[in-house]
Image (tube, grey):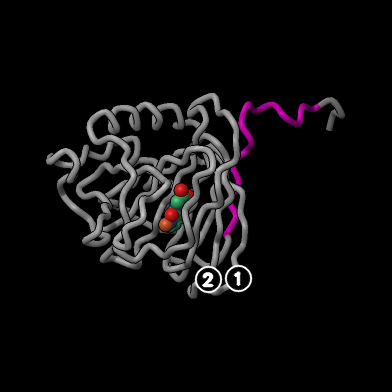
Amino acid sequence: MPASLPLFEFPHPVETREELAPGAWVLRGFALDVAEALSGEIERITGVSPFRHLVTPGGRTMSVAMTNCGEVGWFSDRRGYRYTRIDPDTGARWPAMPPSFLRLARNAAHAAGFEAYSPDVCLINRYEIGTRLTLHQDHDERDRRAPIVSVSLGLPATFLFGGLARKDLQRRMPLVHGDVVVWGGPSRMRYHGVLPVKTGEHPLTGARRLNLTFRVAR
Ligand code: MD6
Ligand code: FE
């Protein structure tokens, strides 16, 4: 083999798969080639159903700003966490899930061993600098076998990946622009969170991190 063979001839890191736990995978760079298209769709969706800071049942305002697209959307206020067909802030249906979102979610689920994935909601999270998501389980969905597909865009973040009990030790996992996490089967109910996003500037998203979380809610 010639010694001069270029080692880094690709503009993006080569995609890799890592199994974090049974049923939980990180697909590095899986969304890189569609990142710009996703970002354009997020602009369009938030033009209809804007980002907002939801209030928890306990009365705290969440620092992460959220909106949704799909058949239903995840919502929270003093009355509780739930999925709704109507965006309570606009009185209209949540924007439809763009085909590019569905395609990416399906391909990622397939790459992690989950066939025929058919999410009915995509929760869109916006993290400004310093914003975090405290440790939680995703337990408002009816189908607890279907995986969650989570796409990271923009600024990097540290993901906390715990166990099935809140007190279980957490692993810290860096997630960067284009990474996709697929999380299902025996890992579906693991506790997880996001540490405060550090100061930075990303060419596509500016001073923020965006996250798409696909789920089968009903
Ligand atoms: C985020 N993600 O990464 C928030 N939940 O911004 C989540 O809450 C999440 O990434 C379940 C499975 C994967 C996730
Ligand atoms: Fe979650």
Quarter occupied by residue 102: top left
Instruction: Mark 2: give few (<14), some (14-19) or many (20+) Cα within 10 Å.
Output: some
Q: Position of residue 86 (x, y in %)?
A: 15, 46
Q: Position of residue 206 (x, y in %)?
A: 51, 27
Quarter occupied by residue 60: bottom left
| Residue at the extreme right | 3
Q: Is residue 172 left or right of residue 150?
A: right
> Is 18 one of the magenta-colored residues?
yes
Instruction: Mark 1: give few (<14), some (14-19) or many (20+) Cα within 10 Å.
Output: few
Q: CA distance from mark 1 to mark 2?
A: 7 Å
What is the quadrant of the N terminus in the image? top right
Give the numbered dot on residue 81.
Answer: none
Q: Position of residue 53 (x, y in %)?
A: 34, 44
**Residue annotated with mark 1:** 169
**Residue annotated with mark 2:** 163
Q: Residue at x 38, y 50 (%)?
A: 62
